[in-house]
Image (tube, rainbow, N blue to C red):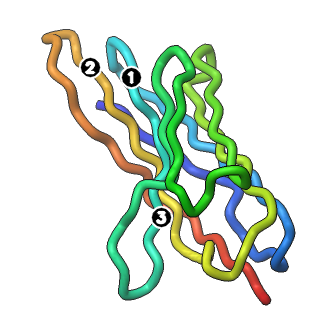
Amino acid sequence: QVDLEESGGGLVEAGGSLRLSCAASGSAVSINIMGWYRQAPGKERDLVASIGSFGGASYADSVKGRFTISRDNAKNTVYLQMNSLKPEDTAVYYCKSIWMDDGGNYHPSWGQGTQVTVSS
């Protein structure tokens, strides 16, 4: 089992920045992909960015050039640096990991979410 604890959300003015953190803990053999999703009221949960074990990253088109995902494998932590924030970035942001157990099986884990609100 892998538990994820997010931090760093809050209220910021448009154009501002926030940094989200997500720390993983538990008994996984390895934590493979880590990523951030977001869900605005009345909308589906969408992928924002993801990063593999060796640092390969991908981004939603809406955040390319503004958000940067990174990870510290020694700390089992993933970060999302969000710059040039827009009101449409307002959402609950969720951390997700794909991890492997000692049987070689892969599982998803989700964090509880952190609110990001961008005022205009």
The residue beneath circle 1 is 32
| Earlier-in-chain disc, 2 versus 1 | 1
Disc 2 marks which amino acid? Met
Residue depicted at 80% across the width and 64% down the height: 84
Residue 73 point in image, percent of width and height: 58, 18
Tag 2 secondary structure: strand
Q: Quadrant of the C terminus?
A: bottom right
Tag 3 secondary structure: strand
The residue beneath circle 2 is 100
Classify residue 105 as left or right of residue 42.
left
Q: Residues within 10 Å of mark 1 (few under 14, many from 20)?
A: some
The residue beneath circle 3 is 38
Disc 1 marks which amino acid? Asn
Residue 104 point in image, percent of width and height: 17, 12
CB atoms at circles 2 and 1 under 8 Å apart? yes
Q: Answer above or below: position of 100 versus 3.
A: above
Residue 103 point in image, percent of width and height: 13, 11
Q: Residues within 10 Å of mark 3 (few under 14, many from 20)?
A: many
Residue depicted at 86% across the width and 68% down the height: 16
Tell me how far mark 2 sits from mark 3, CA to CA. Answer: 24 Å
| Earlier-in-chain disc, 3 versus 1 | 1
Residue depicted at 32% across the width and 42% down the height: 109
| Earlier-in-chain disc, 2 versus 3 | 3
Disc 3 marks which amino acid? Arg
